[in-house]
Amino acid sequence: MTTPSLYETIGLSVNFWRPTVAFTPGSPNTVTVTPKGRHRGTLTDTYTSLSYVLNAVGGFWSASIGFTDDRLAMEEWLEDGVGLYVEIADPGTSIVWAGFVNSLNMNLAGLTITKGPLLDAGNRVIVSYAPLESAAITEPQLGTRTDTVEGEDDDSQRKYGILYAYLSTGGVTAIEAGQLRDMFLVENAEPKLSRSLDLSGAAGDSAVTLDCAGYVQMFGQWPYAYTLVSALTNLSTKMSSVINADPNGIFSSANSSITANTIQVPTWESSQRDAWTILRGLVDLGDMTGSRYLFQVGANQHVTYAPIPTEAEYHQRITGRRQEIETVSGRSVQPWHVKAGNWVIIPDLLVGTLPAATLRADPRAMFIEQLTYTAPWGLSLQGGDADRINQIIARYGLDGTDL
């Protein structure tokens, strides 16, 4: 009897595209990345492992895909696999996860090759430094911290889009800071390669594992600054401004569903914090009624910012023979269709107990903070009761002002 493949068992397919990059040289260069560019191929029967992670704050976060292929195909993956756009789709072609290949690990007989992560590369590099104005005295005199001009690698940007690297160093001269920038650029414009060779065992099948990242992780790649006006603005307005500053044009407020939030926050940003740090800080503030909000990037890089649900989406019965998620109406939900950022009720726990006033106060309710799906049927939910302590800390800090 032949064991059915994962694809035959669950019907999930994995599709790959080579993103297209519209590149315009300048000072600095500009690019527009279209993730779903040229179709690269589809994995069905050949994948041997598949898993992904969804976060309540973040959405499509990470994925891992393992498969086998012949040596020639493996070499092609080594050449251009990193950076490919990835979609995992159900039999009805609905997207259950999407992102890009961040790194790959390849085994060819006794040779192991790792390429990436792409997020550790840098093809636009800036060095922040304190100028060394005088080293002729006992204690060096340092000037006001400043940034070098951008160093850029055109070839890498044409392939991957803009990958920021913002470095910081101590007291150096402007020439030394420029040399550090240029050296980093030469060594890191392309994803790193590492290799190991083990000849102690028999040669096995060629195999590759793709470690993928959701596009939301790109927000942690680039700094955001706004120094034209020092004023307050609506939180949702600033969120749109941060999204629109994406140097690769992957995200925009036009491809977003952003719920209006009138908490007042400073427009000013001059500390070169990365966009994800800023967005997380805004999300932590909630709104003026104390409601918690979620920020997610889903299919087609669509951004959603909205309050957490107030009604349960799922049921899971601990006494049932079938350990599976159901809708509140009793319809079975395939594990790859369960979404983070929703409430799940365990209705056969504390049977006879009166319902709590809110889901947060109900001991049978769990808010899904993180979800891990592992093919074919594995599903792990991590959660709590939607704790708002981070929101409270942020509200009484310096991130926002209620007016």
Image (cartoon, rainbow, N blue to C red):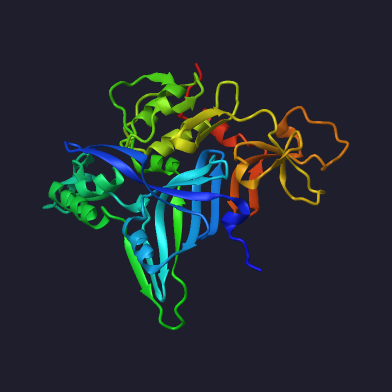
Q: Can residue 139 be seen in this snapshot?
A: no
> For the view shown, which residue lies furthest in the bottom direction?
200
In this rendering, is residue 92 above or below 199?
Answer: above
Q: Residue furthest right?
A: 352
Residue extending farthest to the top is 403
Lateral position of residue 330 relative to residue 124, left or right: right
Q: Is residue 225 above or below residue 76?
A: above
Residue 264 % position (x, y): 46, 20
> In x, y percent, where is residue 384?
66, 42
Q: At 36% across and 57% down in the image, what residue appears?
A: 116
Q: Residue furthest front?
A: 1
In the rendered image, the vertical position of residue 341 relative to residue 111, given as above or below: above
**11, above or below 229, in the image:** below
Q: Tell me, yes or no, if residue 94 can be seen here.
A: yes
Tell which of 202 and 390 is nearer to you.
Answer: 202
Residue in front for this viewpoint, 288 or 260? 260
Name the residue located 42 percent from the left edge and 38 percent from the top edge: 276
The spot of residue 251 in percent (x, y) is 39, 33
Q: How many marks?
A: 0
Q: Which of 183 and 109 lies nearest the eye of the viewer?
A: 109
Q: Where, quadrant-wise, is the N terminus in this rendering?
A: bottom right
Figure quadrant of residue 183:
bottom left
Q: Is residue 11 left or right of residue 213?
A: right
Q: Position of residue 158 (x, y in %)?
A: 24, 45
